[in-house]
Amino acid sequence: MRLLSRAVRSAAGLRETSRRHFWGWLNAVFNKVDYERIKAVGPDRAAAEWLLRCGAKARFQGFERWHQDYNGLPTGPLGRYKIQAIDATESCIMYRGFDHLDGLKHLEEIKFNKCIYIEDACLERLSSIENLQESLYMMEVVSCGNVTDKGLIALHRLRNLEYLFLSDLPGITDKQKTVERLQKALPRLEVELDLE
């Protein structure tokens, strides 16, 4: 009887592992960058399509409403709608898709909240994008378990970052030193912490 019970538990564990691998694969597909699509519709439209495919929301310049329905994205002349804010709460965006951010010139705010695929490499990549170094001024990183001090310190390249909210980040081991390094590099930066 114990042998049968162990076999059933093992099979259930394999099924769960297979399910996780399937979702990981599907999320990687959603994050794949189509450079031809970016050329055809422009960087903002292509980035919006990527974000919504992955479960994030986008807000365009001049609009109060957040767009989260892929089929409800506004249409119009190429380049008319510019992404001003991204709310990636509980989305599956990952490093693989961050090339979508390269052409965004008007992105001011970004929220990473409960994003299981956001890690240090994502924050390093984000902060290396020249357009975002100029435009991004507000950011939140909340409940992203793969973010460590290294990823947060990389944000020092976002020259116009004025507000950074950090909460529930178990990978942060030296919050005081990390915040000091950021504020030394970015004197105007206000950091709000909830890391207890």
Image (cartoon, rainbow, N blue to C red):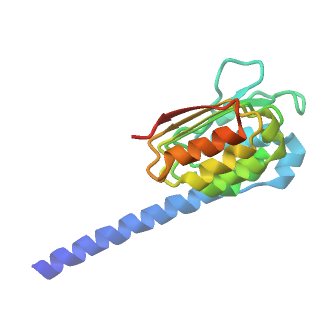
| Quarter assignment of residue 10 | bottom left
Residue 44 vs residue 142, the one in the foreground? 142
Indicate the quadrant containing the C terminus: top left, top right, bottom left or bottom right.
top left
Residue at the image point whose x is 77% and y is 38% from the top: 159
| Residue 117 in sight in this render | no
Residue placed furthest toward the bottom? 3
Q: Position of residue 27 (x, y in %)?
A: 58, 55
| Vertical arrangement, residue 191 with respect to residue 179, above or below | above
Q: Position of residue 110 (x, y in %)?
A: 65, 35
| Quarter assignment of residue 83 | top right
Indicate the quadrant containing the N terminus: top left, top right, bottom left or bottom right.
bottom left
Residue 42 vs residue 130, the one in the foreground? 130
Residue at the image point whose x is 23% and y is 73% from the top: 8
| Residue 9 in sight in this render | yes
How many numbered marks are there? Answer: 0
| Quarter assignment of residue 130 | top right
Residue at the image point whose x is 57% and y is 58% from the top: 26
Residue 10 vs residue 172, the one in the foreground? 172
Q: Position of residue 149 (x, y in %)?
A: 56, 52
Residue at the image point whose x is 49% and y is 43% from the top: 114
Q: Is residue 61 left or right of residue 141?
A: right
